[in-house]
Image (spheres, rainbow, N blue to C red):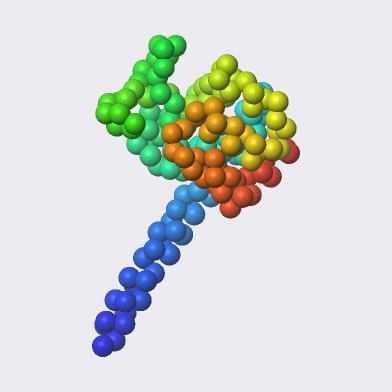
Amino acid sequence: MRRIHLCLLMIGLLPLMSIAQQNGAYQTYIASYAQMAQDQMRRYGIPASITLAQGLLESGAGQSMLAVKANNHFGIKVGSSWTGPYVLRNDDAPNEKFRKYNNASESYEDHSKFLHGRRYQGLFQLSITDYQGWARGLKACGYATNPAYAESLIHLIEMYSLYQFDTG
């Protein structure tokens, strides 16, 4: 009987352990890349909270295949102007081409340049502290196909207080 209770207790704790592991990975990612996101904010005018939230979401806190094998933290696909290396991954279609970088710093820099493209110009009319407007604007401009993309970014920003990095 005691063994059954222990098994039931462990089964009940598994989801909590998974959440704790995810939270730890997210905290580690934030600590590792917050300064880089703030540097990009100062150079390009993109809220650090948005950059961090997109990095967390798109890269699975740096643990996705794209982040590990291609240093691609933002899920940016090749596109017509990309002349660098790429990796293949199934996404919206099979074997889509995603940009490959030498390191995370290149990925962060390219993300900032990508958002300075014509498609996203309207976002730069928003305040640097309007992370909700930026999140909804990214979705409206077509950054991601996930219908809950904006709300996912906002949730991450608020859950991990990423907005604190927008004022530094």
How many numbered marks does the figure carry? Answer: 0
Left of 133 or right of it: where is 138? left
Front residue (pair 32, 168) = 168
Please tell me whether residue 28 is drawn above or below residue 109 in the rendered image.
below
Please tell me whether residue 94 is drawn above or below residue 79 in the rendered image.
below
| Residue 69 locus on image (x, y percent) | 35, 31
Residue at image x 37%, y 71%?
12
| Residue 74 locus on image (x, y percent) | 47, 31
Which residue reaches farthest bottom? 1
Front residue (pair 81, 10) = 81
Q: In which quarter of the image is residue 102?
A: top left
Quarter of the picture holding the C terminus: top right
Please say whether residue 82 is visible from this viewpoint. yes
Please tell me whether residue 34 is drawn above or below residue 86 in the rendered image.
below
Please say whether residue 37 is visible from this viewpoint. no
Q: Quadrant of residue 117?
A: top right
Residue at image x 54%, y 40%?
150
Left of 12 or right of it: where is 2? left
| Residue 26 locus on image (x, y percent) | 50, 48
| Residue 98 locus on image (x, y percent) | 37, 24
Q: In which quarter of the image is residue 132?
A: top right
Quarter of the picture holding the N terminus: bottom left
